[in-house]
Amino acid sequence: MRRLMLISFSPSTLLRLAPFQTQTLQCYLCTTTITEKPRPVLEHELDHSTVRETLLSFNNDWKRALDFFNWVESHCHFHHSTDTYNLMLDILGKFFEFPLCWDLIHRMHTRPSSPPNHATFRVMFKRYVSAHAVDDAIHTFNRLREFNLKDPTSFSNLVDALCEYKHVLEAQDLVFGSNNSFDVDGVGNTKIHNMVLRGWYKLGWWGKCKEFWEEMDRKGVHKDLHSYSIYMDILCKGGKPWKAVKLFKEMKGKGIQLDVVVYNIVIRAVGLSQGVDCSIRVFREMKESGINPSVVTYNTMIRLLCDSYRHKEALALLHTMRHNGCHPNAVSYHCFFASMEKPKQIIGLFDGMIGGGIRPSMDTYVMLLKKFGRWGFLRLVFIVWNRMEQLGCSPDASAYNALIDALVDKGLIDMARKYDEEMLVKGLSPKPRRELGTKLLGGESADE
């Protein structure tokens, strides 16, 4: 029997899981029987991009990801780089497999070709803090001396992770508190202040954002372009886009050198406060000033047009960005999927997206599964689900829950229960549902 060592699926299955790779894995991976010795694989037969894409296809199934990670090294003589190690750490950390993470880090530490770096521990900080294990993240920072990485860069990465995942109070205490033992300049460090400001933005505490912005002035902190960009975004997302436009005009009046990020925010702000036609004028102004639009710029314009149901103009802009060498991404298409109301039109655009070489993200699948499920189009739900599997994307909890909701709504309880059980096997958390008799985390059934 031919199979991947340590993996419960065949190589042909593995090939279907990563069709967006630049080269097919069949050119690289050695298949082997349990009894035969694997053939040697030439160094040029594997590239890191292909291994990375395959790992990404397993990012919601850590056991398969780790089996593949070890298999490709032991049976194909592939030498993992620090980058592929970091990706594997990220997948393991997503499922709270921190002891396995440290096993990999110690393995990296013994290999000169793939030593742990700042990105390695940025991943660890991110995963610990996203799991609300703040003390473990700080303890990890304190251990970095053994890796010669306990420095300002690692400290910034720790603070950034705390702010990114809504532990701003802990970040402030770490930087500005009386117990700060990290020798960080809390007054003059613009970068750290920007992180904390962005942390309050992530929490959506708009009053606290304003308070901290004014506190930066009182403390004499130099505000750079990034500071202004963050605060403009805060004003826009906080429901005051006209104030973001006003701040933009103040920046221009002060002669501050503007960049594409600032324009992206003001285009959105103008669109919300004055309408999409005014945004088009700002878009043209940006190009006339010599600043090239980015993918985010085009996506912002496409979203504003789609929100106004001007889909033909949005599609024309989609073609324009390709012509200008700015390739659309999944978010470009999300703008259409969110506002379109004809299933045939949406599926046609979805097929065109894939045909154009744009890989759907998990957000793409979840958006379409929910939309078609809400409309009651179960056939289209399974078209999207099957396409996701064909393209090698392992479903996450949100995708499973969207599918199960659609099945329950149609009364297909046995089929829904099958996917519910499949989630549990993968270590994902299903929603409690009365129809399935599933239980809440506290042990009570959903109908109690």
Image (cartoon, rainbow, N blue to C red):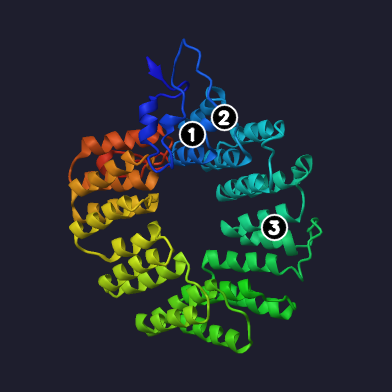
Q: Amino acid at mark 2?
A: Glu
Label tally: 3
Residue occupying the point 51% across, 25% down: 71
Per the image, label 3 sits on a secondary structure element best described as helix
* Picture residue at 43% right of the left edge, 40% below the top: 57
Residue 277, quarter of the rendered image: bottom left
Give the label, 2 or 1, closer to the camera: 2
- Whether residue 211 is visible here, answered yes or no, is yes
Tag 3 residue: 156
Q: Which mark is residue 274?
A: none
Tell me the quarter of the image containing the N terminus. top left
Work out whether mark 2 precedes mark 3 in sequence or the reverse, and give the earlier one. 2
Return the disc, 2 or 1, that comes first in the chain's sequence.
2
Secondary structure, mark 1, is helix
Amino acid on which the number 1 mark rests in the picture: Ala
Q: Which mark is residue 65?
A: 1
- In this view, the mark in front (2 or 3): 2
Q: Percent position (x, y) of residue 116?
A: 68, 40
Taking the view exactly as shown, the residue that stands out farthest to the top is 35
Residue 189 pos. (x, y %)? 74, 68
Picture coordinates of residue 96 (x, y %)? 54, 39
Q: In the displayed structure, would residue 327 be above or below residue 418?
A: below
**Residue holding disc 2:** 43
